[in-house]
Amino acid sequence: MLQLRVFGQPTRLTTTAHQLGAIDGVQRVMVVDAAEPETAVLWADISPVAADHVLTELEGLGVAAEDYILARLDVIAPTGHRALGGAPEGFAWVQVLGEARANARPLARFSVLMMIAGVIASLGVIDDNPILIVGAMAVSPDLLPICATCVGIVGRRPPLIRQALATLLVGLALAAVVAGLVAGALDLTGDLPHFNADQGVLHGLSNVDYSTVIIALAAGIAAMLAFETRASAAVGVAISVTTIPASAYLGVAFALGHASKGLNALAVLAVNVVALLFSGSVTLAVQQLAARRRAG
């Protein structure tokens, strides 16, 4: 459930309350006096499927952006609570767009986590250790810019696409470069074990086949569904199976002189990213279309 608060003059908010109360999915609308003179607060519970309609209505009524807040409300009682009108929680484009904008920026924390993932994955690649590779996938936060890019594509917002895609590419490049530096350092110190670019779990990181595409397409669907909920941390491990191992393999292969294998890993990474963006965007577009049909 979402909760709306609008601040303004009592008379104007009374008119706003009547307008919002006529929208399906808006309930428990009230206007209460605030501590400041000639100021009141409008409160309302909003179903996610009505959120975009409500914001459009507020804009049409001339409510300034700094005069309202729309926030997610976590209901802990009564048990089994459902959204307004008895329907399950729906799709709110404004909520997804807000999350995308927040996660499209190249924050320092994102870059550091991607580099740490590169370090762990490089050791997994060098030692052919799937446990380390999975650990690197758990650290990597690349699900966030991937989904933000999908939101930009579906919402036709080029600035968001450019920012999110740049963040993703920089993160993957950092992971690859750090992985290469680790491999190169181990090689210089003589601590590098024998590296076989075709062994065990590494074989799939340098060859594009039908499973590469299928896994990435499925991961893209899971990524977008998780992005809209609070399951993104857990599902992010599954998403990174298509990106972090290939990025680390790319860096290690080039650092150790296996240029052809490195280029193959780059091809795997590119196919995975394109498939992730495609299936994630389609998933979001289908949800948006379904939400519009329900609202209509």
Image (spheres, rainbow, N blue to C red):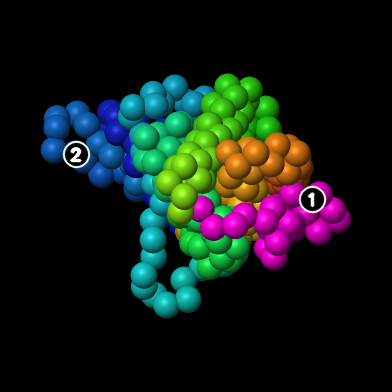
- Residue 265 quadrant: top right
Residue closest to the eye, 137 or 4: 137
User: In the image, which residues are magenta?
Assistant: 192-219
Q: Is residue 213 above or below residue 135?
A: above
| Secondary structure found at label 1 | loop
Apparent side of residue 74 relative to residue 152 in the rendered image (left or right):
left
| Secondary structure found at label 2 | loop
- Residue 289 quadrant: top right
Amino acid on which the number 2 mark rests in the picture: Ala
- Please give the name of the residue rendered at 39% of the width and 75% of the height, measured from the top-left corner: 78
Q: Position of residue 199 (x, y in %)?
A: 70, 61
Q: Position of residue 217 (x, y in %)?
A: 75, 52
Residue closest to the eye, 108 or 246: 246
Q: Nearer the viewer, mark 2 or mark 1?
A: 1
Q: Position of residue 64 (x, y in %)?
A: 39, 24
Q: Residue furthest right?
A: 210
Q: Which residue is mark 2?
A: 34
Q: Position of residue 94 (x, y in %)?
A: 53, 39
The answer to whether residue 51 is visible is: no
